[in-house]
Image (cartoon, grey):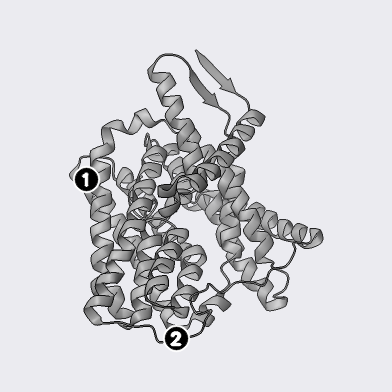
Amino acid sequence: MNLEINQVTTIFLAIGLLVLGMFLVNKIGVLRKFCIPAPVVGGLVFAALATLLKSLGVVEFTLDTSLQSLFMITFFTTIGLGASFKLVKLGGKLLVIYWLACGFLALAQNVIGVSMAYLFNLHPLIGLMAGAVSMEGGHGAATAFGQTIEDLGVDSALSIGIAAATFGLVAGGLIGGPIVKYLITKYDLKPVETDEDAGIPIGETEKPIETNQFFTQLLLITFCMSLGTYLGELFSTATGFVLPGYVGAMFVAVIVRNIVDKINPKVVDMKSIGLISDVSLGIFLTMALMSIKLWEIANLALPLLVIVFVQVVFITLFGIFILFRMLGKDYDAAVMVAGFTGHGLGATPNAMANMAAVTQRYGPSRKAFLIVPIVGAFLIDVFAIPIIITTINLFQ
């Protein structure tokens, strides 16, 4: 029996699964420890149940996920609006070095993924889905680009990307601490700051979200979405170079943010934008994961695990022997390596969790808590997404 679920019920189901995911993450220690996102948990619960029911011949679900793209574009637009170049100046030279290292990592991860795909006689874009898309990009990019690559005729790209992102997320949470412990022990590193708040991320003061201000942010977001999707379509038509609408929206948002900052920096309210970002990401990720077909990637489990393992080995060696030295070979550099492995394989919350665990034991690092969230949450995509888009067009 095929059960078709309409658009409204699909949204209801997605939000219900998101809430279920939040509950499970709060209750199950291992999920909380490795910062597994609630949408991933809730979505995979449904995907696993749907797979079981299909395999038993009971029922197959058909979901109407047509609104998924709206939430996806909204999320990437909020990322662009968070990329203020004033933040780059605030972080100084170390932020630029860290940012460039993230750009290099995206390139290296794609080279590894595509090369390993050829080794296993797979389509190179399958390797890309286990490269920067799912490693540095995480579940959000895996979902967005997975759909784009499936539209190019590569089956199961979305499911593979989600699986690789999940493996990477767990690995990123596992290896950050041991790497930093090795560096601290070997070089006898100690924190140089003594401020009580040195290990606390720098954020905006708490203030209520006002209705007028909230709608101003919605106006900015929808303007960037509208203009960006049109420009993306025009660019793709004129050049033949695939540029998804959500990418165009994100880069328009970067430009708009920095123009607005010149005119009136108070216009952009990151608290409101952050709320919109969290809601849109949660719903679009849940919708994507609840609709993946797990049975389609069973025969790719071994190649996928091998590719992710090679990615983990590479980022470990790069972090210890190159990035640590580039950042100054001090305690702050070691803590930033923990953050780098966290979001380089998973997501910014992974990075923050890694650094929090290190600083709670060894002492604060204000530089790390300033630089890593800025790059990991916002600036990283300025390099990563063009690299991913170029790779897609090389191998489509």
Q: Secondary structure at mark 2?
A: loop
Residue 47 placement: quadrant: top left
Residue lying at 56% horizontally and 36% vertically, measured from the top left: 17
> For this view, does 318 lie left or right of residue 343?
left
Instruction: Check residue 118 in the rendering and tell me which mark sits there, or answer none.
Output: 1
The answer to whether residue 72 shows anywhere in this view is: no
Judged by depth in the image, the label closer to the viewer, 1 or 2, is 2
- What number of labels is visible? 2
Amino acid at circle 2? Glu
- 56 over 46 or under it: above or below: above
Residue lying at 30% horizontally and 70% vertically, measured from the top left: 180
Percent x, y for residue 2? 51, 16
Amino acid at circle 1? Tyr
Percent x, y for residue 227? 65, 55
Q: Which residue is mark 2?
A: 193
- Of residue 98 and residue 357, the one placed in the foreground of this image is 357
